[in-house]
Amino acid sequence: MLYARQRRTLPLWAALLLPLLTLLLGFTAGRLSAPKATLAAALAPASAHLLAASGALDIAGLEGTRAAQGNAESRAASLRAAQTARTAVLNDASLQQLYPDQTATFIARLDEVDRAVQARRDPATPLADARAALRTLTERLRAASR
């Protein structure tokens, strides 16, 4: 024999099927090892924003009572805290999409707090209304994430 016999090559169908099968197995393994997505995990950032807004409301209340007595630094701090609470809620798109009415109510109550502080009135009543609106928003979010 003058020439060596050539080995058999892989059939074309097997050469095309092997990378496709490997890709399918990799995809399946990736999906099976991924953590399960839950609504609670998706709403966790919104819950954190509501917690930040609650803390800012507490500061606005403490500084607002001093601002009503004429303390300019407390007035500025109260306005900053109300702005922080507003920003915390408005920066979360899921809150605005899921609860537009409650979010708008909370923002309106914060506007009342701002007006009371700027007019050097005691912001206790508007703050109580803002806290009630925030509590409603928080309760709805907790109910949705269960």
Image (spheres, rainbow, N blue to C red):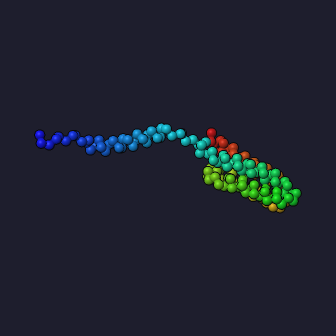
Q: Position of residue 119 (x, y in %)?
A: 83, 61
Which residue is more in the foreground, 68 or 7? 7
Asked whether, in this view, residue 14 is left or right of residue 141, the answer is left
- Which residue occupies 29% across, 41% down? 14
Residue 133 in view here: no
Which residue is more in the foreground, 101 or 71? 71
Q: Position of residue 23 (x, y in %)?
A: 39, 43
- Most distant residue in the front direction: 2
- Which residue occupies 65% across, 41% down? 143
Asked whether, in this view, residue 44 is left or right of residue 17, the answer is right
Split into 4 quadrants, where in the image is the N terminus?
top left
Q: Is residue 32 above or below residue 56?
A: above
Residue 86 in view here: yes
Which residue is more in the foreground, 95 or 32? 32
- Which residue occupies 19% across, 41% down? 6
Quarter occupied by residue 114: bottom right
- Which residue occupies 82% across, 51% down? 62
Quarter occupied by residue 87: bottom right
Asked whether, in this view, residue 93 is left or right of residue 10, the answer is right
Q: Position of residue 140 (x, y in %)?
A: 67, 45
